[in-house]
Amino acid sequence: MNGDYLTRFLIHEQRKSPNATGEFTMLLSDIATACKAIAHEVNRGALAGNLGIAGSENIQGEAQKKLDVIANDLFIRSLEWTGHLAAMASEENDEIIPIPPAHAKGKYLICFDPLDGSSNIDINLTVGTIFSILRAPEGRDNPTEADFLQPGTQQVAAGFCTYGPTTLMVLTTGNGVNGFTLDRDVGEFVLTHPNMRIPEETSEFAVNMSNQRYWEEPVRRYIDECLKGKDGGREKNFNMRWVASMVAEVYRILTRGGIFMYPYDTRDVNKPGRLRLMYEANPMSFIVEQAGGASSTGRRRILDIEPNGIHQRVPVILGSKAEVERVVSYHR
Ligand SMILES: O=P(O)(O)OC[C@H]1O[C@](O)(COP(=O)(O)O)[C@@H](O)[C@@H]1O
Ligand SMILES: [Mg+2]
Ligand SMILES: [Mg+2]
């Protein structure tokens, strides 16, 4: 019910499955607590010396920001003792993160991007956290990377939190998409955006135009037509947005529709895209599809991809169904 606290909403959802043990509810609630802690550090910014680079690099070859490392540590420390996880995987860790032997283990795996949109931290723009939850294979005490490599259709939940003008958590457990705003006075997420739906039609696209010369023909054609609008083959004019934070782009699309693209580019054949499948493309695709949108590489549904590594990159085209299907049709 609108205005419900997240915990109450989760328990309400839990009651719909008679065999539920409550473990899932508690895990989601612990994730919300971790996001509150990250929101606090993001919000403190320069006051706490949290801006700037950390002086280290991650497996992607990216210079880590201080808040990438702070958010990563906070997320791991908040979740490793909960007893609901068998192992974790993070954008900022080369390998799988095991649960320390001293802590109880659970039946879920989590993949996460502790801080999405890192290039926007020092310029005070919206950043966020993205997560995807999978089941661990039964009886597997120490899951390996291979145990994480499940197609996105196997996700049991996915969500993201945005740290912007307000702190918002968007969540799906496969039963629609709901948005919760953090009430800082109470310290609780409150259901403010029940049953979010993406409009089928849109006239707003988001892509990093500076990469245009590396795109394949179908994407060039689509963006060209959007830029020409009514003066070209399209029946309407288009507006453009690019925030450089996937969390902010997807939240905009959940709110008013749109198409977001980080397509295949020819710069490096070993790097078919910028965004990572396990902790960016899969969770966002689950949310987008649950809200009535579509998500594709241009050639196939992202949620059907059989992953080949936890840091695998894929092309991403997601958002309002009609536009995504148009781009996909140009690839046929
Ligand atoms: O810098 P670019 O090419 O505009 O890319 C922006 C994209 O990269 C990202 O920042 C990658 O995520 P991280 O910040 O977690 O590495 C996305 O959020 C965003 O959509
Ligand atoms: Mg990211
Ligand atoms: Mg990140």
Image: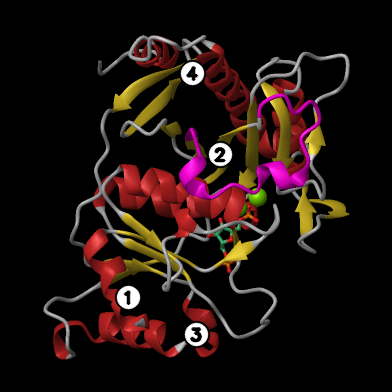
Q: Earlier in the sequence, mark 2 or mark 3?
A: 2
Dot 2 corresponds to which residue?
Answer: 132
The furthest residue to the left: 235
Q: Amino acid at mark 3?
A: Trp
Q: Residue at x 28, y 45 (%)?
A: 255
Q: Residue at x 27, y 38 (%)?
A: 196
Q: How many marks?
A: 4
**Magenta residues (range):** 138-157
Q: Residue at x 26, y 74 (%)?
A: 326
Q: Main secondary structure of the magenta part?
A: loop
Q: Residue at x 44, y 32 (%)?
A: 168
Q: Residues within 10 Å of mark 1 (few under 14, many from 20)?
A: many
Left/right placement of residue 227 relative to residue 81 reads left
Dot 3 corresponds to which residue?
Answer: 215
Work out how far the residue at label 1 is from the one at label 3, CA to CA, in angstroms.
Answer: 13 Å
Dot 1 corresponds to which residue?
Answer: 327
Left/right placement of residue 254 relative to residue 212 reads left
Residue 174 at x, y percent in the picture: 38, 34
- Camera-near label (2 vs 3) is 2
